[in-house]
């Protein structure tokens, strides 16, 4: 089983994954919880980082995450790249895994395209290389790799996992948080790619737009179920 939730921002919003808020007694390491960006637990190699990564590793489930904009990309990209479920990953712990950009994974029988990244609208208040990184926006090579992998899959996947979303979805929700090459890229994918549903985080909202796009923050849902199937609301 695959579950999804929005940003954790390190320990700030991790409480949604504790046993009081998310029933997990019957889960196993073959069940997955996907964090849709702004993971935030690979930040400064602090004792706190290590504590929470170990905490996640000890859960009954396996934690998967895509990167958002509030990540330390110097540290994240220092992990060895390996292949898992058909796509490139950084294995942070045995059961804490970063799903890299532009990949197609086959997880629990589902074909899933991943593309992390977004713009930090607060970057003017952050310091480059300390609290903000240019790599928050995917490179041309990462976006090209995504197109190549989608071509190899005949432009058909079951689900799309991203941090931000397309200009079209933002417009439908009256959200104009950003507009850049990544949002344009998602517009193109939205027109060309065949998919069942698209999930993203970033906006600190829990809602579904245009019928096929769900944005998550503090809700936890099962993959393929709509916003009425939330596991927990708080």
Image: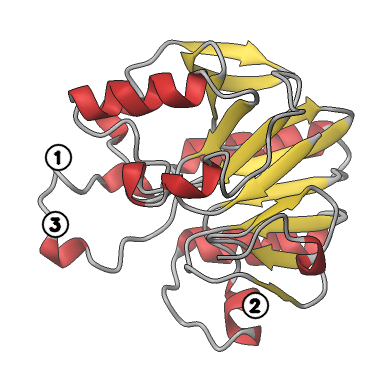
State the residue position of label 1.
Answer: 129
Task: Name the residue carrying label 3.
Answer: 126
Total marks placed: 3
Give the Cα distance between marks 1 and 2.
Answer: 32 Å
Task: Name the residue: 51% across, 18% down.
Answer: 58
Whether label 1 touches label 2, CB < 8 Å: no
- Is residue 157 rendered to the left or right of residue 163? right
Q: Residue at x 71, y 43 (%)?
A: 3
Residue 18 place in picture, x, y as percent: 52, 40
* Residue 138 quadrant: top left
Q: Earlier in the sequence, mark 3 or mark 2?
A: 3
Instruction: Give the position of the N terminus as an image quadrant.
Output: top right
- Residue 104 drawn at (x, y percent): 73, 32
Q: Residue at x 47, y 14 (%)?
A: 93
| Marked residue nearer the N-terminal end (1 or 2) | 1
Report the side of 233 relative to 141 (left or right).
Answer: right
Q: Is residue 4 above or below residue 57?
A: below
Query: Which residue is painted at 73% across and 66% down in the image?
Result: 213
Indicate the secondary structure of the residue bearing disc 1.
loop
Q: Nearer the viewer, residue 232 or 157?
A: 232
User: Which residue position is annotated with label 2?
Assistant: 168
* Residue 45 in view, yes or no: no
Residue 145 lies in quadrant: top right
- Tell me how far mark 3 sits from mark 2, CA to CA: 28 Å
Q: Residue furthest bottom?
A: 174
Please tell me which residue lies in front, 179 or 208: 208
Q: Residues within 10 Å of mark 1 (few under 14, many from 20)?
A: few
The location of residue 128, given as percent across then percent down, is: 13, 47
Bin the neighbour count of mark 2 within 10 Å (Cα to Cα): few under 14, some 14-19, many 20 and up: some
* Quarter of the view holding residue 108: top right
């Amino acid at each position: 089983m695959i579950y999804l939730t929005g940003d954790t921002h390190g320990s700030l919003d991790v409480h949604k994954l504790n046993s009081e808020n998310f029933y997990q007694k019957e889960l196993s390491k073959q069940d997955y919880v996907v964090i849709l960006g702004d993971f935030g637990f690979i930040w400064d190699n602090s004792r706190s980082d290590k504590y929470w990564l170990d905490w996640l590793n000890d859960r009954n489930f396996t934690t998967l995450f895509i990167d958002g904009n509030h990540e330390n990309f110097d540290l994240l990209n220092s992990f060895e790249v390996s292949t898992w479920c058909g796509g490139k990953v950084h294995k942070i712990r045995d059961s804490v895994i970063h799903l890299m950009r532009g990949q197609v994974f086959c997880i629990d029988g589902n074909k899933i395209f991943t593309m992390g990244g977004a713009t930090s609208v607060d970057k003017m208040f952050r310091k480059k290389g300390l609290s903000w990184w240019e790599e928050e926006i995917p490179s041309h090579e990462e976006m090209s790799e995504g197109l190549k992998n989608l071509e190899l899959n005949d432009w058909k996947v079951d689900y799309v996992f991203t941090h931000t979303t397309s200009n079209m979805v933002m417009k439908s929700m009256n959200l104009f948080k950003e507009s850049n090459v990544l949002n344009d890229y998602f517009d193109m994918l939205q027109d060309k790619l065949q998919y069942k549903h698209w999930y993203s985080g970033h906006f600190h909202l829990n809602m579904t737009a245009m019928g096929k796009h769900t944005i998550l923050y503090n809700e936890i849902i099962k993959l393929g179920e709509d916003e009425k199937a939330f596991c927990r609301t708080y």
